[in-house]
Amino acid sequence: MWLFTSVTPDQLRSRDLRHSLLTYMQAPPELQGTSPGLSSVPQDEQCEPFDSLFEQRVYRKIKECGYHVVPQWKASDKRIDLVVVGETGRLAVECDGSPYHSAPDQIRDDYERERELRRAGWQFWRVRSSEFALSPQDSLAPLWKRLDALGIRPGVTEEPQGQSGSTWSPVDMDDADPNTDELDALLDEDASVSLEGA
């Protein structure tokens, strides 16, 4: 989305929806979720928020390579096992194996969910637990190539530098009647702008 404007956030009232849109575009909210440190994700004991020990082990391998990984990413009303985030994009990583991806109904539901999320623009990469158990390095080799092709690099977790202006916060839209004087001033301001443009 491109936003063209001739005003700056300090020229608008903080409760103005235009202020909200402008500050959102200048400094969008932080990425969803967090990327736990390796020390807080054990190798052999399942912990929150992961669904399985296999998912944790895949997470650890990706994290060890320096990538920013968010477990259990919420997308609409669905969850993605792992999302690798970089400066230029993100990739959903699904961990297929027991206990969540073994029954035919579970497999079908999983692919239905993926198909819906692909329609929303998500890209997926899958790893099977049997391949990972045989050789974690070989099973993840295609992932490194895919991340590289998408421009997702290790170690890039900071927000882009050089963003100026206010930080975004949602406008609180209460049900109370607006101040009549403030509303009249806004209407007068809008009327004078349209007269100048005529």
Image (cartoon, rainbow, N blue to C red):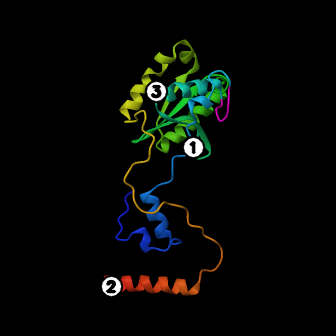
The amino acid pointed to by label 2 is: Glu
Give the camera-side residue of 178 and 10: 10
Q: Are marks 2 and 1 in contact (CB under 8 Å)?
A: no
**Dot placed on the residue nearer the N-terminal end, 3 or 2:** 3
Q: Is residue 108 left or right of residue 117?
A: right
Q: Which residue is mark 2?
A: 196
> Can residue 71 be seen in this snapshot?
yes
Which of the 4 image quarters holds residue 26? bottom left
Give the number of the mark in front: 2 or 1. Answer: 1
Image mark for residue 10: none
Q: Which residue is mark 1?
A: 33
In 3D space, how far apart are the residues under numbered discs 3 and 2 (Cα atoms)? 58 Å
Crowding around mark 1 (Cα neighbors within 10 Å: few <14, some 14 to 19, many 20+) is: few
Residue at figure coordinates x 39%, y 26% from the top left: 145
Mark 2–mark 1 Cα distance, whole angstroms, equals 47 Å
In percent of width and height, residue 116 lies at 54, 41
Q: Is residue 198 visible?
A: no
Residue named by callout 3: 65
